[in-house]
Image (cartoon, grey):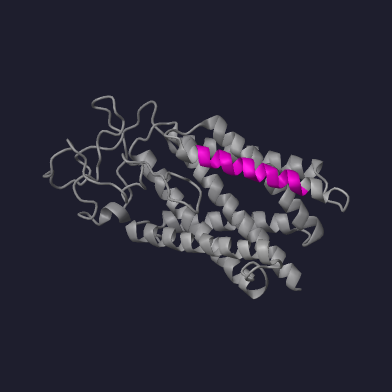
């Protein structure tokens, strides 16, 4: 499964679509082992000797043979047309987030959450969330990134965020939406600085830990939701009170870890010369992660104000 949702496995820029360098295996007909002195000399995954952009695999020898493969920055691919650049990622991420923010602002303004209309507005928000989820799954299973699909996901996700933010901001905690936005921006900046300074090392062990922790977190929240639906109240209490605060913090930390994985994916894609269309995939992943962090902050703020 190549989902970009934080609860599922991440698609990277490697030949077999596993996370870059972490899920590769020797390929039949690949370059022979024996190149000395340069672990990347055997080629990059986007070289096109036979018309196949994924014909070569730089990890075909042994992904563990060179430890600096994970700890150092990947080699820089020569600039050429049709290759992804950092500017491509920035522009497409800004476009995706821009659509999301505009949709959220419009739904906030046009879908009132007073006592007479909250049911209808919340229903539309949930409907938009379900559509966004379906679009996200469709993109996750597609072999190539689709810009219209990703932008449509952002629009429907924005409608849902606008309704939820308006409900919490107007009925539970005034100013909660802006606090959640500031918190998300702070986490993004902190992780980016830590990643660029190499305080965070995204290697196979880090990837495995994050995926295992996220799977456990999501399964636990699903069990809590089932208990809440069929048993009423707050379920097992994992989303309210002291436990709710604890798991909210865990959710933010997991989101920060996924940001580091996103930064690694972007770095590898630029370095190895990924096709320009893959910038949309990077934008999709960053948007999903930022939405995850924002919602966790929003939930934390709501819980803290309900406890006052």
- For the point 50% across and 37% down, the residue is 139
Was residue 87 drawn as part of the magenta stretch in this picture?
A: no
Image quadrant where residue 221 sits: bottom right
Task: Give the quadrant of residue 149.
Answer: top right
Q: Would you place residue 239 above or below residue 14 in this image? A: below
Residue visible at 23% across and 27% down in the picture: 49
Q: Quadrant of the N terminus?
A: top left
Q: Can residue 275 be seen in this view?
A: yes
Observer-nearest of 135 and 109: 135
Magenta segment: 122-138
Residue 123 part of the magenta-drawn span? yes
Residue 100 visible in the current orientation: no
Is residue 82 placed above or below 186 in the rendered structure? above
- Judge whether 118 appears above or below 31 on screen: below
**Picture coordinates of residue 48, whole percent (x, y):** 27, 28
Q: Predominant secondary structure in magenta?
A: helix
Residue at (59, 71) in percent of width and height: 246
Residue 144 image point, x, y percent: 44, 33
Residue for point 43% across, 52% down: 261
Q: Where is residue 245 in the image (x, y as percent from the top left)?
A: 63, 70
**Can you give x and y, in whole percent of width and height, for residue 206 in the image?**
38, 60
Instruction: Answer left or right for 39 relative to 263.
Output: left
């Amino acid at each position: 499964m190549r989902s970009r949702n934080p609860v599922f496995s991440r698609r990277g820029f490697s030949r077999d679509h596993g996370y870059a360098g972490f899920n590769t295996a020797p390929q039949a007909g690949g370059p022979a082992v024996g190149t000395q002195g340069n672990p990347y000399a055997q080629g990059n995954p986007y070289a096109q000797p036979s018309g196949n952009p994924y014909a070569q695999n730089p990890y075909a020898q042994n992904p563990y043979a060179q430890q600096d493969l994970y700890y150092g920055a990947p080699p820089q691919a020569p600039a050429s047309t049709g290759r992804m650049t950092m500017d491509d990622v920035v522009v497409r991420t800004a476009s995706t987030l821009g659509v999301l923010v505009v949709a959220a602002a419009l739904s906030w303004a046009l879908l009132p959450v007073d006592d007479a209309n909250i049911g209808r507005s919340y229903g539309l928000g949930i409907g938009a969330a379900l559509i966004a989820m379906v679009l996200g799954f469709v993109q996750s299973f597609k072999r190539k990134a689709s810009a219209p699909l990703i932008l449509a996901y952002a629009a429907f996700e924005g409608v849902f965020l606008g309704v939820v933010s308006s409900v919490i901001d107007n009925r539970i905690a005034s100013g909660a939406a802006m606090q959640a936005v500031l918190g998300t921006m702070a986490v993004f900046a902190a992780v980016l600085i830590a990643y660029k300074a190499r305080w965070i090392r995204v290697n196979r062990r880090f990837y495995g830990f994050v995926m295992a922790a996220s799977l456990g977190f999501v399964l636990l929240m699903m069990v809590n939701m089932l208990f809440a639906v069929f048993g009423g109240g707050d379920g097992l209490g994992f989303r309210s009170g002291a436990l709710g605060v604890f798991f909210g913090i865990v959710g933010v930390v997991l989101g920060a870890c996924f940001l580091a994985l996103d930064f690694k994916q972007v770095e590898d894609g630029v370095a190895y010369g990924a096709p320009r269309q893959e910038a949309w995939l990077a934008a999709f992943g960053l948007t999903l992660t930022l939405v995850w962090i924002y919602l966790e902050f929003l939930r934390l703020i709501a819980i803290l104000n309900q406890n006052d």
